[in-house]
Amino acid sequence: MTKFSPLNVRTLSLLLAFPLFLLNYSSAQTIAAYGSHSLAICNDNTAKGWGANSYGQLGNGTNTSNYVAQPVSSLTAVISVKGGGSHSLALKSNGTVWTWGSNNQGQLGDGTNTDSNVPLLVSTLTGMTMIASGGETHSLALKSDGTLWSWGENTHGQLGNGTLTNSNVPVQVSVLTSVKSMSGGANHSIALKTDGTVWTWGRNNYGQLGNGNNTSSNVPIQVTSLTGIIAVSAGYYHSLALKSDGTVWAWGRNDDGQVGNATNVNSNIPVKVNTITGIIAIAGAGYHSLALKSDGTVRTWGRNSYGQLGNGNSTNSNVPVQASSITGIIAIAGGSWHSLALKSDGSVYAWGNNTSGQTGRINNTTNDVPLVIPGLCQITTAVEDATTDLPAISIYPNPSNGHFNIEGIKGSTRVNIYNALGEMVFNSILENNSALDISAQPNGVYFLQLETIGGTVNQRFIIQK
Protein backbone atom coordinates (compact mmCIF):
# COMPACT_ATOMS: atom_id res chain seq x y z
CA MET A 1 0.00 0.00 0.00
CA THR A 2 1.37 3.38 -1.04
CA LYS A 3 0.89 6.24 1.36
CA PHE A 4 1.08 9.86 0.15
CA SER A 5 2.03 12.33 2.86
CA PRO A 6 2.25 15.91 1.54
CA LEU A 7 4.07 18.50 3.63
CA ASN A 8 1.40 21.01 2.79
CA VAL A 9 -1.31 19.94 0.36
CA ARG A 10 -2.05 23.50 -0.74
CA THR A 11 1.52 24.15 -1.84
CA LEU A 12 3.56 21.01 -2.39
CA SER A 13 2.38 20.13 -5.88
CA LEU A 14 2.89 23.73 -6.96
CA LEU A 15 6.41 23.93 -5.52
CA LEU A 16 7.38 20.69 -7.22
CA ALA A 17 5.80 21.61 -10.53
CA PHE A 18 7.07 25.16 -10.98
CA PRO A 19 10.52 26.70 -10.56
CA LEU A 20 10.51 30.03 -8.76
CA PHE A 21 11.11 32.06 -11.92
CA LEU A 22 7.69 30.96 -13.20
CA LEU A 23 5.77 32.50 -10.33
CA ASN A 24 3.67 34.57 -12.74
CA TYR A 25 2.06 31.49 -14.27
CA SER A 26 -1.41 30.18 -13.51
CA SER A 27 -2.39 28.05 -10.54
CA ALA A 28 -6.12 27.43 -10.42
CA GLN A 29 -8.29 24.75 -8.88
CA THR A 30 -11.57 25.26 -10.79
CA ILE A 31 -12.41 26.69 -14.23
CA ALA A 32 -15.57 27.78 -16.02
CA ALA A 33 -16.48 29.30 -19.37
CA TYR A 34 -19.49 30.30 -21.42
CA GLY A 35 -20.25 33.18 -23.71
CA SER A 36 -17.05 35.13 -24.33
CA HIS A 37 -15.57 35.21 -20.84
CA SER A 38 -13.79 32.77 -18.55
CA LEU A 39 -13.57 32.23 -14.80
CA ALA A 40 -11.29 30.42 -12.37
CA ILE A 41 -10.98 29.82 -8.66
CA CYS A 42 -7.48 30.29 -7.28
CA ASN A 43 -5.96 28.16 -4.55
CA ASP A 44 -6.88 30.76 -1.93
CA ASN A 45 -10.55 30.32 -2.92
CA THR A 46 -10.85 33.73 -4.51
CA ALA A 47 -12.17 34.05 -8.07
CA LYS A 48 -10.83 35.70 -11.21
CA GLY A 49 -12.38 36.45 -14.59
CA TRP A 50 -11.14 37.50 -18.01
CA GLY A 51 -12.57 38.19 -21.45
CA ALA A 52 -15.73 40.09 -22.41
CA ASN A 53 -17.00 42.52 -19.77
CA SER A 54 -19.46 44.89 -21.41
CA TYR A 55 -22.13 43.88 -18.87
CA GLY A 56 -19.80 43.56 -15.90
CA GLN A 57 -19.60 39.77 -16.16
CA LEU A 58 -16.01 39.79 -14.84
CA GLY A 59 -17.29 41.19 -11.55
CA ASN A 60 -14.37 43.55 -10.95
CA GLY A 61 -16.32 46.79 -10.70
CA THR A 62 -15.71 47.87 -14.31
CA ASN A 63 -17.21 47.18 -17.73
CA THR A 64 -13.90 46.94 -19.57
CA SER A 65 -12.96 43.68 -21.30
CA ASN A 66 -9.53 42.32 -20.43
CA TYR A 67 -7.28 39.44 -21.51
CA VAL A 68 -5.57 39.60 -18.09
CA ALA A 69 -7.41 37.77 -15.31
CA GLN A 70 -9.13 40.25 -12.99
CA PRO A 71 -10.01 39.52 -9.33
CA VAL A 72 -13.76 39.27 -8.74
CA SER A 73 -14.54 41.96 -6.19
CA SER A 74 -15.00 41.06 -2.51
CA LEU A 75 -15.55 37.31 -2.95
CA THR A 76 -13.78 34.81 -0.67
CA ALA A 77 -14.36 31.15 0.25
CA VAL A 78 -15.52 30.44 -3.32
CA ILE A 79 -15.90 26.75 -4.18
CA SER A 80 -17.58 26.93 -7.61
CA VAL A 81 -17.97 29.44 -10.46
CA LYS A 82 -20.07 29.33 -13.61
CA GLY A 83 -20.36 31.65 -16.59
CA GLY A 84 -23.50 32.43 -18.55
CA GLY A 85 -23.86 34.27 -21.83
CA SER A 86 -23.10 37.63 -20.21
CA HIS A 87 -23.42 36.90 -16.50
CA SER A 88 -21.59 34.86 -13.87
CA LEU A 89 -22.34 32.91 -10.70
CA ALA A 90 -20.32 31.84 -7.68
CA LEU A 91 -21.06 29.39 -4.87
CA LYS A 92 -19.44 30.00 -1.50
CA SER A 93 -18.54 27.35 1.06
CA ASN A 94 -21.38 28.59 3.31
CA GLY A 95 -23.95 27.57 0.68
CA THR A 96 -24.78 31.07 -0.56
CA VAL A 97 -24.95 32.07 -4.24
CA TRP A 98 -23.56 35.30 -5.71
CA THR A 99 -24.16 36.68 -9.21
CA TRP A 100 -22.99 39.54 -11.42
CA GLY A 101 -23.18 40.80 -15.02
CA SER A 102 -26.16 41.22 -17.33
CA ASN A 103 -29.58 41.13 -15.66
CA ASN A 104 -32.01 42.13 -18.38
CA GLN A 105 -34.07 38.96 -17.84
CA GLY A 106 -33.56 38.67 -14.10
CA GLN A 107 -30.73 36.14 -14.42
CA LEU A 108 -28.94 37.59 -11.37
CA GLY A 109 -31.86 36.56 -9.16
CA ASP A 110 -31.68 39.59 -6.88
CA GLY A 111 -35.27 40.77 -7.47
CA THR A 112 -34.29 43.44 -10.02
CA ASN A 113 -33.46 43.63 -13.71
CA THR A 114 -30.47 45.92 -13.21
CA ASP A 115 -26.99 44.89 -14.36
CA SER A 116 -24.20 44.71 -11.79
CA ASN A 117 -20.42 44.69 -12.28
CA VAL A 118 -19.84 43.46 -8.71
CA PRO A 119 -21.20 40.30 -7.04
CA LEU A 120 -24.69 40.40 -5.52
CA LEU A 121 -26.08 37.94 -2.99
CA VAL A 122 -29.06 35.88 -4.15
CA SER A 123 -30.64 36.40 -0.75
CA THR A 124 -33.40 33.81 -0.99
CA LEU A 125 -30.99 30.89 -1.44
CA THR A 126 -29.25 29.01 1.39
CA GLY A 127 -27.82 25.53 1.69
CA MET A 128 -26.83 25.36 -1.97
CA THR A 129 -24.35 22.73 -3.17
CA MET A 130 -24.08 23.40 -6.93
CA ILE A 131 -24.70 26.16 -9.48
CA ALA A 132 -25.17 26.29 -13.25
CA SER A 133 -25.92 28.95 -15.83
CA GLY A 134 -27.78 28.94 -19.09
CA GLY A 135 -25.92 29.91 -22.22
CA GLU A 136 -27.97 33.06 -22.43
CA THR A 137 -30.16 34.40 -19.65
CA HIS A 138 -31.13 31.91 -16.96
CA SER A 139 -29.48 30.39 -13.90
CA LEU A 140 -29.81 27.26 -11.77
CA ALA A 141 -28.88 26.21 -8.23
CA LEU A 142 -29.11 22.86 -6.45
CA LYS A 143 -30.03 22.71 -2.77
CA SER A 144 -28.69 20.19 -0.25
CA ASP A 145 -32.16 18.63 -0.01
CA GLY A 146 -32.03 17.64 -3.70
CA THR A 147 -34.43 20.31 -4.94
CA LEU A 148 -33.56 22.51 -7.91
CA TRP A 149 -34.11 26.26 -8.22
CA SER A 150 -33.99 28.52 -11.30
CA TRP A 151 -34.39 32.16 -12.27
CA GLY A 152 -34.13 34.48 -15.29
CA GLU A 153 -35.67 34.18 -18.74
CA ASN A 154 -38.48 31.66 -19.15
CA THR A 155 -39.74 32.34 -22.67
CA HIS A 156 -39.38 28.65 -23.59
CA GLY A 157 -40.02 27.15 -20.17
CA GLN A 158 -36.32 26.84 -19.31
CA LEU A 159 -37.05 27.58 -15.63
CA GLY A 160 -39.14 24.40 -15.47
CA ASN A 161 -41.79 25.71 -13.09
CA GLY A 162 -44.81 25.13 -15.33
CA THR A 163 -45.03 28.70 -16.63
CA LEU A 164 -43.54 30.85 -19.39
CA THR A 165 -43.07 33.85 -17.12
CA ASN A 166 -39.62 35.29 -16.43
CA SER A 167 -38.57 35.47 -12.79
CA ASN A 168 -35.93 37.72 -11.23
CA VAL A 169 -36.00 35.65 -8.03
CA PRO A 170 -35.40 31.90 -7.70
CA VAL A 171 -38.39 29.58 -8.26
CA GLN A 172 -38.46 25.84 -7.65
CA VAL A 173 -38.23 23.54 -10.65
CA SER A 174 -41.41 21.43 -10.73
CA VAL A 175 -41.55 17.70 -10.02
CA LEU A 176 -37.84 17.12 -9.50
CA THR A 177 -36.36 15.77 -6.28
CA SER A 178 -33.16 13.85 -5.53
CA VAL A 179 -31.28 15.91 -8.12
CA LYS A 180 -27.55 15.19 -8.30
CA SER A 181 -26.39 17.75 -10.87
CA MET A 182 -27.64 20.00 -13.65
CA SER A 183 -26.62 22.17 -16.59
CA GLY A 184 -28.10 24.98 -18.68
CA GLY A 185 -28.17 25.46 -22.45
CA ALA A 186 -29.14 28.57 -24.37
CA ASN A 187 -32.85 28.07 -23.72
CA HIS A 188 -33.08 24.62 -22.14
CA SER A 189 -32.00 22.89 -18.95
CA ILE A 190 -30.94 19.37 -18.04
CA ALA A 191 -30.78 17.58 -14.69
CA LEU A 192 -29.38 14.28 -13.44
CA LYS A 193 -31.09 12.49 -10.57
CA THR A 194 -29.33 10.26 -8.05
CA ASP A 195 -30.93 7.22 -9.66
CA GLY A 196 -29.02 7.89 -12.91
CA THR A 197 -32.03 9.18 -14.87
CA VAL A 198 -31.92 12.36 -16.99
CA TRP A 199 -34.60 15.04 -17.12
CA THR A 200 -34.85 18.02 -19.52
CA TRP A 201 -37.07 21.04 -20.07
CA GLY A 202 -37.24 24.27 -22.08
CA ARG A 203 -36.83 24.87 -25.78
CA ASN A 204 -36.78 21.82 -28.04
CA ASN A 205 -36.55 23.17 -31.60
CA TYR A 206 -33.49 21.03 -32.37
CA GLY A 207 -34.49 18.05 -30.23
CA GLN A 208 -32.24 19.15 -27.38
CA LEU A 209 -34.67 17.69 -24.82
CA GLY A 210 -33.98 14.21 -26.19
CA ASN A 211 -37.51 12.84 -25.81
CA GLY A 212 -38.16 11.91 -29.44
CA ASN A 213 -40.01 15.05 -30.54
CA ASN A 214 -39.36 18.75 -31.04
CA THR A 215 -41.99 20.13 -28.67
CA SER A 216 -40.84 22.49 -25.93
CA SER A 217 -41.77 21.78 -22.30
CA ASN A 218 -42.06 24.09 -19.28
CA VAL A 219 -41.79 21.18 -16.84
CA PRO A 220 -39.10 18.47 -16.64
CA ILE A 221 -39.59 15.38 -18.77
CA GLN A 222 -37.52 12.20 -18.56
CA VAL A 223 -35.14 11.15 -21.32
CA THR A 224 -36.39 7.59 -21.08
CA SER A 225 -33.72 5.99 -23.25
CA LEU A 226 -30.93 6.90 -20.82
CA THR A 227 -30.01 5.03 -17.63
CA GLY A 228 -26.82 4.67 -15.63
CA ILE A 229 -25.82 8.30 -16.27
CA ILE A 230 -23.22 9.91 -14.01
CA ALA A 231 -22.89 13.40 -15.56
CA VAL A 232 -24.79 15.77 -17.86
CA SER A 233 -23.85 18.96 -19.69
CA ALA A 234 -25.61 21.29 -22.11
CA GLY A 235 -24.31 23.20 -25.10
CA TYR A 236 -26.31 26.02 -26.61
CA TYR A 237 -28.73 23.76 -28.48
CA HIS A 238 -27.40 20.26 -27.79
CA SER A 239 -27.03 18.06 -24.74
CA LEU A 240 -24.49 15.53 -23.47
CA ALA A 241 -24.63 12.65 -20.99
CA LEU A 242 -21.83 10.47 -19.60
CA LYS A 243 -22.60 6.85 -18.73
CA SER A 244 -20.93 4.88 -15.95
CA ASP A 245 -19.22 2.73 -18.61
CA GLY A 246 -17.26 5.77 -19.85
CA THR A 247 -19.27 6.29 -23.06
CA VAL A 248 -20.80 9.64 -24.07
CA TRP A 249 -24.28 10.18 -25.50
CA ALA A 250 -25.47 13.35 -27.24
CA TRP A 251 -28.57 14.81 -28.88
CA GLY A 252 -29.98 18.04 -30.33
CA ARG A 253 -28.52 20.42 -32.90
CA ASN A 254 -25.81 18.84 -35.03
CA ASP A 255 -25.18 21.04 -38.06
CA ASP A 256 -21.56 21.52 -36.95
CA GLY A 257 -21.09 17.94 -35.76
CA GLN A 258 -21.46 18.82 -32.08
CA VAL A 259 -23.36 15.58 -31.40
CA GLY A 260 -20.28 13.66 -32.54
CA ASN A 261 -21.90 10.68 -34.26
CA ALA A 262 -20.20 11.14 -37.67
CA THR A 263 -23.24 12.91 -39.15
CA ASN A 264 -24.48 16.50 -39.34
CA VAL A 265 -28.13 15.56 -38.79
CA ASN A 266 -30.00 16.81 -35.74
CA SER A 267 -31.19 14.12 -33.34
CA ASN A 268 -34.10 14.32 -30.88
CA ILE A 269 -33.00 11.14 -29.14
CA PRO A 270 -29.62 10.36 -27.56
CA VAL A 271 -27.02 8.82 -29.88
CA LYS A 272 -23.63 7.44 -28.95
CA VAL A 273 -20.65 9.69 -29.61
CA ASN A 274 -18.28 7.86 -31.93
CA THR A 275 -14.99 6.24 -30.98
CA ILE A 276 -14.46 7.48 -27.42
CA THR A 277 -14.44 5.43 -24.22
CA GLY A 278 -12.84 5.84 -20.82
CA ILE A 279 -14.36 9.30 -20.39
CA ILE A 280 -14.57 10.79 -16.87
CA ALA A 281 -15.95 14.29 -17.58
CA ILE A 282 -17.90 16.13 -20.30
CA ALA A 283 -18.53 19.78 -21.18
CA GLY A 284 -21.05 21.20 -23.61
CA ALA A 285 -19.95 24.44 -25.27
CA GLY A 286 -21.66 26.84 -27.68
CA TYR A 287 -21.52 24.71 -30.81
CA HIS A 288 -18.84 22.21 -29.84
CA SER A 289 -18.28 19.58 -27.16
CA LEU A 290 -15.43 18.40 -24.95
CA ALA A 291 -14.65 15.17 -23.11
CA LEU A 292 -11.89 14.31 -20.64
CA LYS A 293 -10.39 10.83 -20.76
CA SER A 294 -9.14 8.93 -17.73
CA ASP A 295 -5.60 9.19 -19.13
CA GLY A 296 -5.74 13.01 -18.79
CA THR A 297 -6.13 13.81 -22.50
CA VAL A 298 -8.97 15.83 -24.04
CA ARG A 299 -11.26 15.03 -26.97
CA THR A 300 -13.30 17.68 -28.80
CA TRP A 301 -15.80 17.78 -31.67
CA GLY A 302 -18.17 20.16 -33.46
CA ARG A 303 -17.65 23.70 -34.74
CA ASN A 304 -14.02 24.74 -35.15
CA SER A 305 -14.16 28.08 -36.95
CA TYR A 306 -11.90 29.68 -34.32
CA GLY A 307 -9.80 26.63 -33.50
CA GLN A 308 -11.94 25.82 -30.45
CA LEU A 309 -11.31 22.09 -30.97
CA GLY A 310 -7.64 22.72 -30.25
CA ASN A 311 -6.26 20.31 -32.87
CA GLY A 312 -4.25 22.80 -34.90
CA ASN A 313 -6.75 23.70 -37.61
CA SER A 314 -10.12 25.39 -38.11
CA THR A 315 -12.03 22.51 -39.73
CA ASN A 316 -15.25 21.31 -38.11
CA SER A 317 -15.33 17.68 -37.00
CA ASN A 318 -18.38 15.48 -36.46
CA VAL A 319 -16.28 12.89 -34.64
CA PRO A 320 -14.00 13.44 -31.63
CA VAL A 321 -10.44 14.65 -32.24
CA GLN A 322 -7.65 15.03 -29.70
CA ALA A 323 -6.73 18.49 -28.41
CA SER A 324 -3.05 18.90 -29.18
CA SER A 325 -0.19 18.58 -26.72
CA ILE A 326 -2.01 18.59 -23.38
CA THR A 327 -1.88 15.77 -20.83
CA GLY A 328 -2.52 15.51 -17.12
CA ILE A 329 -5.81 17.38 -17.48
CA ILE A 330 -8.33 17.12 -14.61
CA ALA A 331 -11.12 19.51 -15.68
CA ILE A 332 -12.55 21.02 -18.88
CA ALA A 333 -14.91 23.87 -19.82
CA GLY A 334 -16.29 25.31 -23.04
CA GLY A 335 -17.41 28.80 -24.02
CA SER A 336 -19.28 29.93 -27.10
CA TRP A 337 -16.20 29.68 -29.31
CA HIS A 338 -13.35 28.86 -26.93
CA SER A 339 -12.26 26.07 -24.59
CA LEU A 340 -10.40 25.70 -21.29
CA ALA A 341 -8.54 22.85 -19.58
CA LEU A 342 -7.13 22.64 -16.06
CA LYS A 343 -3.98 20.58 -15.54
CA SER A 344 -3.15 18.68 -12.36
CA ASP A 345 -0.33 21.12 -11.58
CA GLY A 346 -2.81 24.03 -11.46
CA SER A 347 -1.98 25.51 -14.86
CA VAL A 348 -4.86 26.49 -17.15
CA TYR A 349 -4.80 26.08 -20.94
CA ALA A 350 -7.06 27.92 -23.38
CA TRP A 351 -7.71 27.87 -27.11
CA GLY A 352 -10.16 29.22 -29.69
CA ASN A 353 -11.70 32.65 -30.21
CA ASN A 354 -10.00 35.48 -28.33
CA THR A 355 -11.65 38.61 -29.71
CA SER A 356 -12.60 39.66 -26.17
CA GLY A 357 -9.52 38.23 -24.46
CA GLN A 358 -11.31 35.09 -23.25
CA THR A 359 -8.31 32.82 -23.88
CA GLY A 360 -5.97 35.21 -22.08
CA ARG A 361 -3.69 35.98 -25.05
CA ILE A 362 -2.25 39.43 -25.62
CA ASN A 363 -3.55 41.54 -28.54
CA ASN A 364 -6.66 39.33 -28.74
CA THR A 365 -4.72 36.70 -30.73
CA THR A 366 -6.69 33.52 -31.50
CA ASN A 367 -4.93 30.17 -31.12
CA ASP A 368 -6.00 26.78 -32.48
CA VAL A 369 -3.87 24.75 -30.06
CA PRO A 370 -3.95 24.87 -26.25
CA LEU A 371 -1.64 27.45 -24.66
CA VAL A 372 -1.09 28.09 -20.97
CA ILE A 373 -2.61 31.28 -19.56
CA PRO A 374 0.06 33.40 -17.84
CA GLY A 375 -0.59 35.44 -14.73
CA LEU A 376 -3.88 33.82 -13.82
CA CYS A 377 -3.45 33.00 -10.13
CA GLN A 378 -0.20 33.96 -8.49
CA ILE A 379 1.64 30.99 -7.06
CA THR A 380 3.14 33.29 -4.44
CA THR A 381 -0.25 33.26 -2.72
CA ALA A 382 0.01 29.52 -2.25
CA VAL A 383 3.67 29.76 -1.22
CA GLU A 384 2.74 32.22 1.51
CA ASP A 385 0.25 29.67 2.83
CA ALA A 386 3.19 27.45 3.79
CA THR A 387 3.82 29.72 6.77
CA THR A 388 0.27 29.34 8.14
CA ASP A 389 -0.71 26.71 10.67
CA LEU A 390 -2.83 24.54 8.37
CA PRO A 391 -2.81 20.78 8.99
CA ALA A 392 -1.04 18.35 6.70
CA ILE A 393 -3.32 15.55 5.57
CA SER A 394 -2.76 12.33 3.70
CA ILE A 395 -5.10 10.13 1.71
CA TYR A 396 -4.22 6.48 1.20
CA PRO A 397 -4.30 4.37 -0.77
CA ASN A 398 -4.23 6.84 -3.63
CA PRO A 399 -5.41 5.78 -6.19
CA SER A 400 -8.06 3.72 -4.42
CA ASN A 401 -11.24 1.86 -5.30
CA GLY A 402 -13.27 4.42 -3.34
CA HIS A 403 -12.39 3.01 0.10
CA PHE A 404 -9.62 5.11 1.60
CA ASN A 405 -8.24 6.58 4.80
CA ILE A 406 -7.69 10.22 5.77
CA GLU A 407 -4.98 11.10 8.26
CA GLY A 408 -4.30 14.53 9.70
CA ILE A 409 -7.80 15.41 10.94
CA LYS A 410 -7.74 16.77 14.47
CA GLY A 411 -11.05 17.22 16.22
CA SER A 412 -14.32 18.09 14.49
CA THR A 413 -13.60 19.05 10.88
CA ARG A 414 -15.95 19.55 7.94
CA VAL A 415 -14.93 17.41 4.97
CA ASN A 416 -16.24 18.10 1.47
CA ILE A 417 -15.47 15.95 -1.57
CA TYR A 418 -16.00 17.21 -5.12
CA ASN A 419 -15.70 15.41 -8.45
CA ALA A 420 -13.94 16.82 -11.52
CA LEU A 421 -17.15 18.61 -12.54
CA GLY A 422 -17.20 20.56 -9.27
CA GLU A 423 -20.18 18.58 -7.93
CA MET A 424 -20.18 17.85 -4.20
CA VAL A 425 -20.37 14.07 -3.69
CA PHE A 426 -19.68 13.96 0.06
CA ASN A 427 -20.18 16.39 2.94
CA SER A 428 -19.87 15.61 6.62
CA ILE A 429 -18.33 16.57 9.96
CA LEU A 430 -15.61 14.04 10.82
CA GLU A 431 -13.88 13.46 14.14
CA ASN A 432 -10.13 12.81 13.92
CA ASN A 433 -8.66 10.36 11.39
CA SER A 434 -11.32 8.52 9.42
CA ALA A 435 -11.97 5.80 6.86
CA LEU A 436 -14.33 6.84 4.07
CA ASP A 437 -16.31 4.90 1.49
CA ILE A 438 -17.36 6.69 -1.71
CA SER A 439 -16.99 3.59 -3.86
CA ALA A 440 -20.39 4.29 -5.43
CA GLN A 441 -18.71 7.13 -7.32
CA PRO A 442 -17.26 6.41 -10.79
CA ASN A 443 -13.59 6.36 -11.71
CA GLY A 444 -11.99 9.77 -11.97
CA VAL A 445 -10.26 12.68 -10.24
CA TYR A 446 -11.73 13.98 -6.96
CA PHE A 447 -10.93 16.83 -4.59
CA LEU A 448 -11.09 16.53 -0.81
CA GLN A 449 -11.49 19.80 1.07
CA LEU A 450 -11.04 20.21 4.82
CA GLU A 451 -12.49 23.35 6.40
CA THR A 452 -10.37 24.36 9.39
CA ILE A 453 -10.13 27.43 11.59
CA GLY A 454 -6.92 28.45 9.79
CA GLY A 455 -8.42 28.06 6.29
CA THR A 456 -9.18 25.31 3.82
CA VAL A 457 -6.91 22.42 2.89
CA ASN A 458 -7.39 20.76 -0.50
CA GLN A 459 -6.10 17.43 -1.76
CA ARG A 460 -6.58 15.65 -5.08
CA PHE A 461 -7.09 11.90 -5.21
CA ILE A 462 -8.12 9.31 -7.76
CA ILE A 463 -10.69 6.53 -7.80
CA GLN A 464 -9.58 3.70 -10.09
CA LYS A 465 -11.52 0.45 -9.76
Image (tube, rainbow, N blue to C red):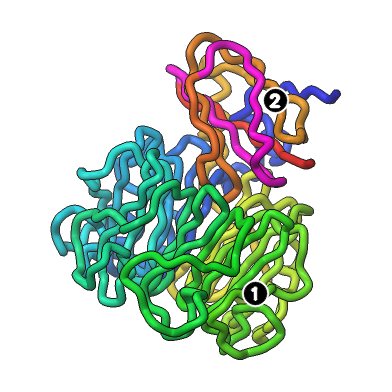
Q: Position of residue 215 (x, y in %)?
A: 39, 82
Q: Nearer the viewer, residue 111 or 344?
A: 111
In the picture, measured across the screen, residue 38 lies left or right of residue 464, that is: left
- The quarter of the picture where the C terminus appears is top right
Residue 86 lies, with reference to residue 142, above or below; the image says below
**Side of 146 relative to 319 (left or right):** left
Question: Mark 1: which secondary structure?
Answer: loop
Q: Amino acid at mark 1?
A: Leu
**Which residue is drawn at the image coordinates 36% and 72% (left, top)?**
202
User: Residue at 52% of width from left, 53% of height from top?
Assistant: 31
* Picture layout, residue 227 above or below residue 208: above
The structure residue drawn at horizontal position 73% and vertical position 21%, both measured from the top left corner, is: 5
Is 264 contained in the magenta span? no
Q: Which residue is mark 2?
A: 395
Assess whether residue 447 is covered by the magenta stretch: yes
What residue is pinned by disc 1? 309
Residues 377 and 444: in front is 444
Please, what is the three-letter code of the amino acid marked with disc 2?
Answer: Ile
Q: Nearer the viewer, residue 138 or 217?
A: 217
Q: Main secondary structure of the magenta part?
A: strand
Q: Secondary structure at mark 2?
A: strand
Residue 156's x, y, as percent? 30, 76
Which one is earlier in the sequence, the residue at label 1 or at label 2?
1
Residue at the image point whose x is 35% and y is 56% from the top: 175
- Rounded to the nearest angstrom, the CA distance separating label 1 from label 2 is 35 Å
Above or below, 329 against 302 in this view is: above
* Residue 190 visible, this orientation: yes
Which span is picked out in magenta?
Answer: 430-454
